[in-house]
Image: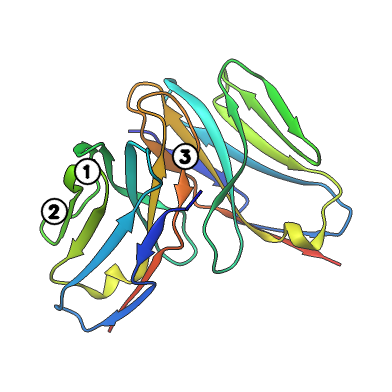
């Protein structure tokens, strides 16, 4: 089956500019996650969707980050305006389970460099 | 919320040796503990997981143990090989919130 698709793979922007990342989860997966992975650290959850509703966004910097999941499928993560500390890999993951436990399938990630 | 601590941050072993990575968690409601392997420049992939009703699980050279009372779980890799070199992440998922929290990762280096 097709895996989690993300784009773009790489993006370089100047601080204060905006950027958007796109994610297409595995077909049938109800749960979608956006993680931020700074070099040398573990993935940090930014937002978790269950279908098109938000389960948790407590660590999303809402003054600059926004995310949406239209129709419970694809999702976009936007940063505006970007800061130097936003340089990281943004990982999208999806999971089949709707409240139990199960494997997270990750995309290749979108590497953001803010200059 | 859940807090997951992972140690060591770096582990260097000789080929054939065993490697052990340890994690602790804070939320007693956590009931699912997966381990992910991330090779350089690649996506994290699940290698083994354990649920709270099980104390130990093995899959060939990899095993995971769970001590619910002490709130810690460990990954054991025996007969390490150079291809085991990667960053390993533990995670804990609460049965209440269903939110996965990851540790900071352990960089395992297996020297030939």
Disc 2, SS: loop
Q: Is residue A7 left or right of residue B54?
A: left
Q: Are marks 3 and 1 on the same chain?
A: no
Labels 1 and 2 positioned on one and the same chain: yes
Q: Nearer the viewer, residue A73 or A98?
A: A73
According to the image, label 2 marks what residue?
A62
For residue A29, side relative to residue A115 (left or right):
right
Q: Residue A14, image x and y in percent?
A: 21, 84
Q: Mark 2 and mark 1 in contact (Cβ < 8 Å)? A: yes
Which element is circle 3 on? Answer: strand
Q: Which chain does the numbered disc 3 sit on?
A: B
- Looking at this view, name the residue that lies furthest to the left: A63
Of all chains, the one bearing label 2 is: A
Indicate the chain on which mark 1 is placed. Answer: A
The secondary element bearing badge 1 is classed as loop
Q: CA distance from mark 2 to mark 3?
A: 24 Å
Give the x, y percent position of residue A85.
Answer: 28, 70
Location of mark 1 (residue): A57
């Amino acid at each position: 089956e097709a895996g989690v698709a993300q784009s773009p793979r790489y993006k370089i922007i100047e601080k204060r500019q905006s950027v958007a990342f796109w994610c297409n989860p595995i077909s049938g997966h109800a749960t979608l996650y956006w993680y931020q992975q700074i070099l040398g650290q573990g993935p940090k959850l930014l937002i978790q969707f269950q279908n098109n509703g938000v389960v948790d966004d407590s660590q999303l910097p809402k003054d600059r980050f926004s995310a949406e999941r239209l129709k419970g499928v694809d999702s976009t993560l936007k940063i505006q305006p970007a800061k130097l500390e936003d340089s990281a890999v943004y990982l999208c993951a999806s999971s089949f389970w709707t409240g139990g436990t199960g494997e997270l399938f990750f995309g290749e990630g979108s590497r953001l460099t803010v200059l | 919320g859940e807090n997951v601590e992972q140690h060591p941050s770096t582990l260097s072993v000789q080929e054939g040796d065993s490697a052990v990575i340890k994690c602790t968690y804070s939320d007693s409601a956590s009931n699912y503990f997966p381990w992910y392997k991330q090779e350089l420049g690649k996506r994290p992939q699940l290698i083994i997981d354990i649920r709270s009703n099980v104390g130990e699980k093995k899959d060939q050279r990899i095993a995971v143990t769970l001590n619910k009372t002490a709130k810690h779980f460990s990954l054991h890799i025996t007969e390490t090989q150079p291809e085991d070199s990667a960053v390993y992440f533990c995670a804990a998922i609460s049965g209440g919130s269903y939110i996965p929290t990851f540790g900071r990762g352990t960089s395992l280096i297996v020297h030939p």
